[in-house]
């Protein structure tokens, strides 16, 4: 074994070399006289160093262009039934290897993704005693890195009962953090805190930070399979320790060696927008295992939904029942007339009467309420070329849901319905999972058992050609690359919070989401509201133009036109943008942005040559001068502009929108004027070639 590894020895010379040269040198002499092994990303931007302290405690650190970003941070585990994996280690490393490939997404925010990284495998072995071993594998990109632990098969480490993961992230400089608390009752559905890094408590990931000198970081994870979700507990200063979501016993995670943990990811970039453009998290996931998933088509949908959140209709049976045959047929007609692919129907199935949240025992996922003629609806939807989006609210009861998965998805397949919205409404710690004894147990939404549950749902759904949009979900870690039927999810405060009789989402919320939650993956935010007065004292705290811009700034391969149909019928002008906007993209670029303040994103449709622009701001008005250099040179475009009127305001004048058209080329610059809490949405339709 040892001969395969390069031994530690080196060199003041090494640290004097330019960063880019070092990866090569490590291949020949991987450790310095300081006993550390090191490697750099392909462009020499990111460098990682790994070593052990005098007591043999493993540590890693990360620098970018020679500047320390993550100061020495511990690696290791506490086990519940054996000595901790934390000191007495020796370190060695394989020569770094280079990788460079490009892969194609079946659907996504861009079609092709470049995957260029340096892989660096570090071996940690206990020097005496149990002589247990673990590898830490780093993948270094120029815009960030991932690392994971790999446990080989070995005599003294068979079953790992992981009480705690000791991985640390010691942010080397002060700055600002945007974060939501972990382990609170409402799971991920909190407004983002903006505090000094040194004031973060226990945070969920992605945890996004801007250092005082302008560098942006975001810590998250990738390929979270059969493991519990990682939260970050700040110890002191900028030092964060992984805090795993609890399991059913005092072990958060139980696994048999050999196995690998999820990747711990750190995105690092100068611009906030570079965090959004980064593909590190997707790249760290395994390639597509499902093969052809062309049965799922990205789409926009309407639904029997907002009327329940406004309390005009009910999920449960009775005089207010929303999911009636008549109401559904009306929605199918509307969808067919206006080009929507799907109709979401909530409350169609037996089980909503009485208390359903946090229990879910009464749900049937095949039996409709008597006033919902499912066969007739299916036939009508098919005749109109519209799919019904299945809805499986479980009340958090994954145990009960699993017993019906096959039957539920088989029924959907029989009707030709290819997407389902699932839901897990239960307070944190109140989900129900199948335990090792086959019985139901209460669990956290991001426990290892729930990771397993969601995987069962995804794999079963794939068998029946169903794609899943989960609410109150397990966190997104880029698994859509491996399972492209994992299309979208909630996992943050959606538009629904602005419907209820409580303070809604403030103007900065969506801008926060773009740089935090959305770094993890697509979100079913449900934009497109024109009826700005709701049960919330704030109503919808945006302008109409911002509601439209959300279709571009918040990525999801399924996008809801969430409002009541009559609000669209009454406002055909702005509704036209919702009808026109694409949902599947060839390219995505962030033109400008500051975390929590504003962002402008352009995306090119994957199925035409049209471009779309979305710009959104918080409560401050903004003016941007944006050169249109992203457009194809030598082409004329009709810019269909939906902008805030000069007197628009998220509090007092939300509906004030100007809709106008202009002819533009890539040589033009557009001034984007965003009202307080406002936005702007533009469709660029190619007209023809300019004269040369
Ligand atoms: C919460 C979901 O976020 C919402 O979209 C859904 O309507 C309700 N649960 C009922 O399932
Ligand atoms: Ca929710």
Image (cartoon, rainbow, N blue to C red):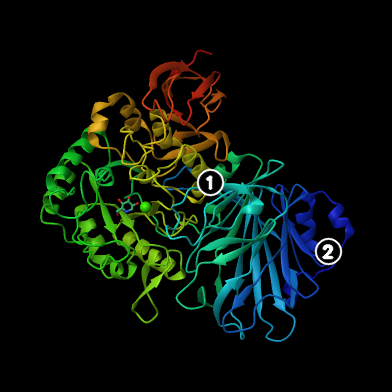
- Ligand 1 contact, mark 1 (Cβ < 8 Å): no
> Image point 28% across, 69% down: which residue?
400
Q: Is residue 27 left or right of 406 when viewed as pictured?
A: right
Residue nearest the viewer, comparing 554 with 144: 554
Mark 1, secondary structure of its residue = strand
Instruction: Identify the disc placed on residue 32.
Output: 2
The Cα atoms of the two marked residues, 2 and 1, are separated by: 35 Å
Residue 667, given in percent of the width and then of the height, sits at 56, 19
Above or below, 136 against 20 in this view is below
Q: Does label 2 or label 1 sit earlier along the sequence? A: 2
> Image point 27% across, 70% down: which residue?
403
Residue 646, given in percent of the width and then of the height, sits at 45, 19
Q: Quarter-wise, where is residue 544 in the image?
A: top left
**Can you say which quadrant of the picture contains the N terminus?**
bottom right
Residue assigned mark 1: 113
Residue nearest the viewer, comparing 502 with 336: 502
Above or below, 284 against 301 in this view is below
Instruction: Identify the disc placed on residue 75.
Output: none
């Amino acid at each position: 074994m040892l001969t395969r590894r390069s031994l530690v020895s080196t060199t003041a010379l090494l640290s004097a070399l330019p960063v880019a040269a070092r990866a090569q040198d490590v291949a020949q002499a991987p450790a310095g006289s300081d006993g550390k092994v090191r490697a750099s990303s392909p462009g020499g931007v990111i460098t990682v160093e790994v070593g052990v302290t005098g007591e043999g405690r493993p540590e890693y650190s990360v620098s970018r262009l020679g500047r320390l970003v993550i100061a020495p941070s511990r690696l290791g585990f506490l086990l519940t039934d054996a000595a901790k994996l934390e000191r007495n280690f020796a370190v060695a490393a394989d020569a770094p290897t280079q990788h460079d490939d490009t892969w194609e997404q079946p659907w996504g925010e861009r079609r092709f993704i470049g995957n260029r990284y340096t892989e660096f495998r570090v071996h940690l072995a206990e020097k005496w005693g149990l002589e247990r071993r673990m590898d830490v594998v780093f993948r270094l990109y120029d815009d960030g890195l991932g690392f994971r632990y790999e446990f080989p098969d070995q005599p003294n480490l068979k079953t790992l009962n992981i009480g705690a993961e000791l991985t640390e992230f010691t942010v080397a400089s002060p700055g600002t953090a945007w974060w939501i608390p972990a382990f609170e009752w409402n799971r991920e559905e909190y407004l983002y805190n903006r505090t000094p890094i040194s004031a973060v408590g226990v945070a969920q990931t992605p945890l996004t930070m801007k250092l005082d000198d302008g560098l942006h970081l975001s810590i998250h994870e990738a390929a979270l399979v059969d493991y519990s979700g990682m939260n970050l507990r700040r110890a002191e200063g900028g030092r964060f320790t992984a805090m795993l979501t609890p399991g059913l016993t005092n072990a958060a995670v139980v696994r048999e060696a050999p196995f690998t943990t999820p990747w711990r990811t750190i995105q690092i970039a100068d611009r906030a927008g570079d965090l959004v453009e980064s593909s590190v998290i997707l790249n760290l996931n395994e390639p597509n295992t499902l093969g052809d998933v062309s049965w799922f088509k990205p789409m926009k949908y309407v639904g029997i939904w907002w009327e329940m959140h406004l309390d005009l209709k009910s999920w449960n049976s009775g005089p207010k029942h929303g999911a009636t045959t008549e109401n559904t047929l009306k929605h199918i007609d509307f969808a067919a007339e206006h080009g929507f692919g799907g109709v979401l129907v909530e409350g169609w199935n037996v089980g909503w009467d009485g208390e359903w949240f946090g229990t879910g025992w009464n749900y049937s996922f095949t039996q409709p309420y008597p006033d919902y003629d499912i066969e007739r609806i299916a036939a009508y939807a098919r005749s109109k070329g519209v799919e019904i989006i299945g809805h499986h609210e479980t009340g958090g009861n994954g145990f009960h849901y699993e017993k019906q998965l096959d039957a539920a998805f088989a029924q959907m397949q029989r009707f030709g319905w290819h997407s389902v919205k699932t839901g897990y409404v239960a307070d944190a710690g109140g989900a129900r999972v199948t335990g090792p004894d086959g019985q139901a147990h209460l669990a956290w939404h991001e426990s290892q058992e729930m990771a397993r549950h969601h995987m069962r749902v995804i794999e079963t759904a794939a068998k029946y050609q169903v794609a899943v949009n989960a609410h109150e979900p397990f966190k997104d870690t880029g698994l859509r690359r491996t399972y492209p039927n994992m299309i979208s999810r909630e996992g943050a405060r959606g538009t629904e919070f602005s419907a209820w009789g409580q303070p809604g989402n403030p103007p900065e919320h969506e801008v926060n989401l773009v740089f935090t939650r959305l770094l993890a993956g697509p979100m079913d935010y449900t934009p497109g509201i024109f009826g700005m007065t709701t049960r919330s004292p704030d109503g919808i705290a945006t302008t109409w133009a911002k509601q439209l811009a959300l279709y571009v700034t918040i990525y999801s391969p399924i996008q809801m036109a969430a409002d009541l149909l009559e609000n669209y019928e009454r406002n055909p002008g702005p509704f036209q943008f919702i009808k026109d906007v694409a949902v599947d993209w060839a390219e995505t670029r962030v033109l400008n942005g500051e975390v929590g303040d504003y962002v402008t994103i352009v995306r090119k449709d994957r199925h035409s040559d049209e471009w779309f622009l979305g710009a959104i701001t918080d409560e401050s008005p903004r003016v941007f001068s944006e050169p249109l250099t992203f457009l194809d040179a030598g082409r004329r475009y009709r810019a269909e502009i939906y902008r805030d009127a000069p007197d628009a305001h998220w509090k007092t004048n939300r509906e004030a929108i100007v809709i106008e058209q202009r002819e533009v080329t890539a040589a033009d610059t557009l001034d984007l004027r965003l009202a307080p809490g406002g936005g702007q949405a533009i469709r660029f339709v190619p007209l023809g070639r300019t004269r040369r």
